[in-house]
Image (cartoon, helix red, strand yellow):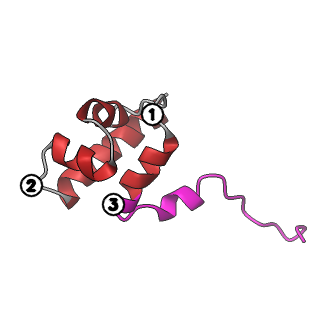
Amino acid sequence: MQTLKQLGDNLRMSRKKSYPHDDMSAFASRVGVSRATLQKMEKGDLSVSVKYYFQAAKLLDAEQGFSELFKLEKSLFDD
């Protein structure tokens, strides 16, 4: 589950860089979650709805990454 931990770490670092004056409660309010839920997100906890991860990504201008999650590379043999 190292990938999930990295997801949470990336969220925390991006939050601090993009909103340096927000404490956790202020940023959680921007996302539309409680402080406790944001704490779970920053640990990579998947019990939190993906819609909140997406909302955080939008706030942090990182939503493009969501469209890349399951993207397959096209081969010469694809239609």
What stretch of residues is rendered in magenta? 58-79
Depth check, front residue: 29 or 7:
29
Q: Which residue is mark 2?
A: 21
Residues packed near mark 3 inside 10 Å, few (<14), some (14 to 19) or many (20 plus): some
Q: Which residue is mark 1?
A: 48
Q: Which residue is mark 3?
A: 59
Q: Marks 2 and 3: CB-CB under 8 Å?
A: no
**Mark 3 secondary-structure assignment:** helix
Please state, as top left, top right, bottom left or bottom right, where the C terminus lies in the image: bottom right
Magenta stretch secondary structure, dominant: loop
- State how far apart marks 1 and 2 are (Cα): 25 Å
> Is 20 included in the stretch rendered in magenta?
no
| Residue 59 appears left or right of 20 | right
Q: Marks 1 and 2: CB-CB under 8 Å?
A: no
| Residue 58 appears left or right of 15 | right
Q: Marks 1 and 3: CB-CB under 8 Å?
A: no
Q: Position of residue 11 (x, y in %)?
A: 33, 47
